[in-house]
Amino acid sequence: MEKYFSLSYILLFFSTISIAQLKPIQYKDGEQLLNGFQITPQKAKKENPGILILPAWKGIDKASKEIAQKLSELGYHAFIADIYGEGNYPKDNKEAGEHAGFYKKNYEQYLKRINLALEQLIKSGSNPDKIVIIGYCFGGTGALEAARGNLPVKGVVSFHGGLGKDNSRITNEITSKVLVCHGADDPYESSEEITDFQKEMRDAKADWQMIYYANAVHSFTNPESGNDNSKGAAYNEKAAKRSWEHLILFLKEVL
C-alpha cells in the first residue's frame, strides 16, 4: 500500500510540472502581417528581464525556437522576431540571400522591424529597462544595427553575424554593451571588415567584446549546418557551448 501511494504521489507530482511553451503572436508593420513567437518563463527572474531573438537569414527556424526555450528555462522572457513577414518567407538559400541583403542595405527598415518585435517582447511582460537583443548570422547583423541605432536595450549579442557597415554612414556613440561571438575561420568576414568593425566600436566609445572560437566557421552554433568546415558554414560543438556560456555571463552582467 505504501509503495502504491508513493508511486501515485510521484506520478501526480510530475503531472503538475509544466514546461513553458512558445506562443505564436501576430503583429503588424502597417499592412504587413508579422508572425513572431513569445515564451513566458514558468519562474521569471527578478525584474523580469527579456531577450529579443533575431533569427538567421531563412527566418524563424528550429534553432531560434530552441534558444527561446532554453532562455525561458533560465527565467528570461523571450520573443523571436519575424523580420520578413507573411508571404515573404524565403524558400531557398537564393531567396534568403536576397531578402537578407535587402534589409542589410535598407538598415532603417530592419531597425523598424526589430523595434516592432521589441514592443511585443515588452507587451509579453518583459521589463523595458532590462532587455538584451541577440541574433544569429543575419540576425547577428541586426543585433549590431540595434546597437548602432541606439535602441533602448542594455546590450546586444551577435553570433557569427555580419560586421560590415557602409563607410559612408556616420558612426554614432553606442550606449548598449556589445558582445560579438565570432568563428576564427569564418570565410564570410574579411580581415578588412573585422578591422573596420573594431575601429567603429572604438570610435563609437562602445563597451564591446569580440571573442574568437578556434576551428569555427560561419553558423557554428547551428547543428543543422553540418560539420564540413570547407563549406564555409558548419556546426562546432565546442564553440557553440563556449559561446553559450559567454552569452550567459554577458546576460548576468548587463541584466
Image (cartoon, helix red, strand yellow):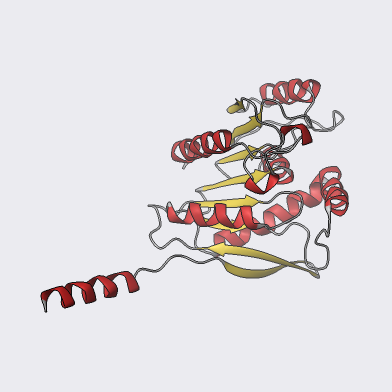
Quadrant of the rendering where the N terminus is positioned: bottom left
Residue at position x 53%, y 53% from top?
128
Residue at position x 63%, y 32% from top?
180
Q: Can you give x and y, in whole percent of width and height, for residue 232 in the image?
A: 77, 34
In front: 207, or 97? 97
Residue 11: image quadrant is bottom left
For the image, the number of numbered tags is 0
Hey, which residue is sitting farthest left in the picture? Answer: 2
In front: 229, or 167? 229
Q: Is residue 171 left or right of residue 53?
A: right
Residue 237: image quadrant is top right
In this view, 157 is above or below 83: above
In this view, 75 is above or below 232: below
Q: Can you give x and y, in whole percent of width and height, for residue 76 in the image?
A: 47, 53
Q: Can you give x and y, in whole percent of width and height, for residue 80 in the image?
A: 63, 57
Asked whether residue 14 appears in the rendered view, the answer is yes
Q: Is residue 142 left or right of residue 246?
A: right
Asked whether residue 151 appears in the rendered view, the answer is no
Residue at position x 62%, y 51% from top?
53
Q: Is residue 25 left or right of residue 166?
A: left
Q: Can you give x and y, in whole percent of width and height, for residue 153 in the image?
A: 58, 45
Q: Is residue 251 left or right of residue 173?
A: left
In front: 160, or 153? 160
Residue at position x 87%, y 49% from top?
102
